[in-house]
Image: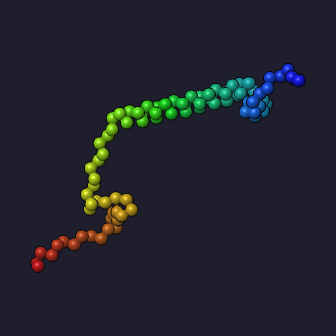
Amino acid sequence: MSTGQPLASGKSQIFESLLWFLPDWVQNTVLVLIVLALLATWVIRLRNKLARRRALRQPQPVPAATRYDQGSGADHLGPYAPQRRPEDSSA
């Protein structure tokens, strides 16, 4: 019941159907670009993993808490905060 042809996976059939009409040099260029993209993602993942390990081995000090006056985040009004009045010294 064998047809004599090797069975290809669905992905390879789709890939071949997309590239079969292109010249060989374009097909080869596309294949090389795909391989380079895969290698680049592997290198980036490896680099990030190594950076994470280094960061865990050498923890950085946490910066000191900012003063309450300076504030930050949603509660911080910045330049829109009301100006402080000088303390009344006549009392």
Q: Residue at x 29, y 42 (%)?
A: 61
Q: What percent of the width, then of the height, locates residue 37?
A: 59, 32
Tell me, yes or no, if residue 19 can be seen here.
no
Horizontal placement of 39 versus 83: left or right?
right
Horizontal placement of 57 versus 19: left or right?
left
Q: Residue at x 33, y 35 (%)?
A: 58
Compared with residue 81, is residue 35 higher up or lower down, i.e. above or below? above
Tell me, yes or no, if residue 53 can be seen here.
yes
Q: Where is residue 59, by image quadrant? A: top left
Q: What percent of the width, then of the height, locates residue 79?
A: 33, 64
State the residue in front, 54 or 78.
Answer: 54
Horizontal placement of 71 versus 25: left or right?
left
Q: Residue at x 80, y 23 (%)?
A: 6
Seen as rendered, the residue at the extreme right is 1
Compared with residue 22, is residue 89 higher up or lower down, i.e. above or below? below
Q: Where is residue 11, by image quadrant? A: top right
Is the N terminus in the top left, top right, bottom left or bottom right quadrant? top right
